Image (tube, grey):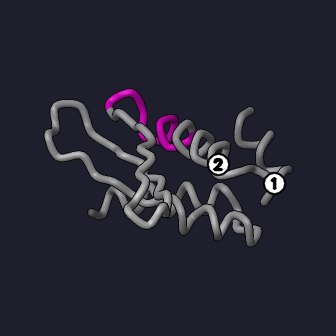
Amino acid sequence: MLSANFESKTGSMDINEFCTHIKSRIQYRLGRKFQVVIQKLVKNNDVTLYELIIAEQGCNNPKSVCLNCYYRKYQKNKNLNAIEADIVDIYLNL
């Protein structure tokens, strides 16, 4: 089980592993009707932002959630399941 594998490593994933894990789990939670991708943006001041882009099939209005703040919460031992639930809740209420 993917989630259990990472749950035991709370705070130990780097940002790329974290984003890959969250993308996979959000895709699983939302199902095949949705496309979920990670977009890495480098700003002018060399700050890198990681966005989770979620689009429902047939919808031309994808929504994005910045993962940087969630990664910081994860590093402070926030539960991955809680982070996933927050992201799904944000998506459904945007």
Counting from the top left corner in percent of width and height, residue 16 is at 63, 44
The answer to which image quadrant residue 4 occupies is top right
Name the residue that disc number 1 marks: 12
Q: In this rendering, would 56 be left or right of 22?
A: left
Residue beneath the point at 41% across and 51% down: 41
Quadrant containing the C terminus is: bottom left
Please, what secondary structure does the residue beneath circle 1 have?
loop
| Mark 2: amino acid | Phe
Image location of residue 93, percent across then percent down:
30, 63
User: Of residues 91 and 66, which is closer to you in this image?
Assistant: 66
Measured in 3D between alpha carbons, the distance from the residue under mark 2 to the one under mark 1, in whole angstroms, is: 9 Å
Q: Which residue is mark 2?
A: 18
Q: Quadrant of the N terminus?
A: top right
Q: Main secondary structure of the magenta part?
A: helix
Q: Amino acid at mark 1?
A: Ser
Write down the region rendered in magenta: 25-33
The answer to whether 28 is drawn above or below residue 7 in the figure is above
User: Which residue is most to the front?
Assistant: 45
Residue at point 59% right, 39% down? 20
Who comes first in sequence, dot 2 or dot 1? 1
- Does residue 65 show up magenta in the picture? no
Q: Could you say which is closer to the camera, residue 30 or residue 18?
A: 18
Discs 2, 1 touching: Cβ within 8 Å: no
For image coordinates 38% across by 62% down, the residue present is 44
Crowd class of label 1 (few under 14; some 14 to 19; many from 20; radius 10 Å): some
31 above or below 16? above
